[in-house]
Amino acid sequence: MAIYDERDKSQSFVQSGSLMNYAGAAVSLALVVGVSVWGYQLIMRDVSGIPVVRAMDGAMRVAPQTPGGDIASHEGLSVNDVAGIGEAAGPSDSLLLAPQTAGLAEEDLSVEPLIDDNLHLESQAEAGEVMPAADAAPTEAQIPTALETSVTTDATERLTTEGILALADQIAGTATPMTALADGATIEPTVSVDGVDVASAPAVAPSVPGVSTSLRPTVRPASVTQASATPSAAPTAAAPQVADTSTAVAAALAEATVATDGALPVGTNLVQLGAFPSADTAAAEWTRMASLFADYMGDKSRVIQEASSGGSTFYRLRASGFTEAADARRFCATLQAANADCIPVVVR
């Protein structure tokens, strides 16, 4: 029995080994066939020119049919097509105008006089005005108008040469011809205003006190010599200017007054131009600013107020003469535009 069992095991092992060999040979053959087919396809694809990535049919970028949403019916402007199509649309085939406005009724078109003519004439008669008569004789000022009307009945009709000559003859017929003056005769001229003669003013009698002879300005000399600007002459020319400035500052210092807070009523609009250690310095600064801003500070009054802070006394230079706070702010805006210090304040 043991011999038979060993013989069966050897036969089964041989059969399983042959099956594995067959399977390996089949797999190897399939791999060789697959590689051969794949290589053949690669060669044939390169030869036929088929790309690796096939292009899609149609445009790569397609604009939406309604870009930005639906357009309202009342927004049919050609500029809207720029965003949707990419270019402005052509001229429209039809244009719709706005509906015609409601016209006036016939009763609205009829115009009635605001004032009765008879009432107007009665009011003139009550006021004592002279009413012109219908059959009154024409005045001299109305004669040319009447003559012109008689020559041309139509205002749009142009006068011909014959019509102009006839009109001139009619005007000359109503005028009195001027007579020539005798030799050596003169006529005293007269002055009239609205047809009324105005008598000339009588000459001033010599006995009346006053200026009897008006002075004439000095005649400029025929030869004018230009002064040479030498260094020695410069201080001499500048001396009068320094003297004038010193005189103005001295006068301002003499007029300088120091006002206290109680001297001004509460609510007075002021502008502060600076703070100085002494009243004289504040007055000198006022004179300087008054010369720089003469157009704006001409009607303003100077106010110098004494104040103390931290144990030291100083003087505020202020200006008064403002009706309201807005005027003070506008005044400070003008001075600040010229790089000058100015602050609007109110007395409290």
Image: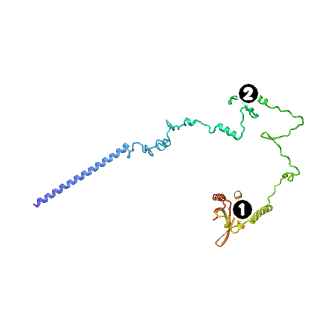
Q: In the rendered view, tell whether residue 30 sits above or below residue 186.
A: below
In percent of width and height, residue 26 lies at 24, 50
Q: Nearer the viewer, residue 116 or 109?
A: 116
Say the numbered circle drawn on residue 288: 1
In percent of width and height, residue 181 lies at 87, 34
What amino acid does circle 1 point to?
A: Arg
Q: In this view, which residue lies farthest toward the front?
A: 126
Circle 2 residue: 163
Give the left or right position of residue 128, taking residue 55 as reference.
right
Q: In which quarter of the image is the C terminus?
A: bottom right
Residue 290: quarter of image: bottom right
Instruction: Name the residue located 65 percent from the left edge and 36 percent from the top edge.
Output: 118
Residue 109: quarter of image: top right
Q: In this view, which residue lies farthest toward the right?
A: 184
- Viewer-nearest of discs 2 and 1: 2
Give the mark nearer the N terminus: 2 vs 1.
2
Is the residue marked by circle 1 packed among few (<14), some (14-19), or many (20+) residues within 10 Å? some
Give the left or right position of residue 56, taking residue 102 as reference.
left
Instruction: Name the residue located 68 percent from the left edge and 62 percent from the top edge.
Output: 319
Q: Quadrant of the N terminus?
A: bottom left
Q: In this view, which residue lies farthest toward the left?
A: 1
Q: Nearer the viewer, residue 127 or 317?
A: 127
Secondary structure type for disc 1: helix
In percent of width and height, residue 36 lies at 30, 47
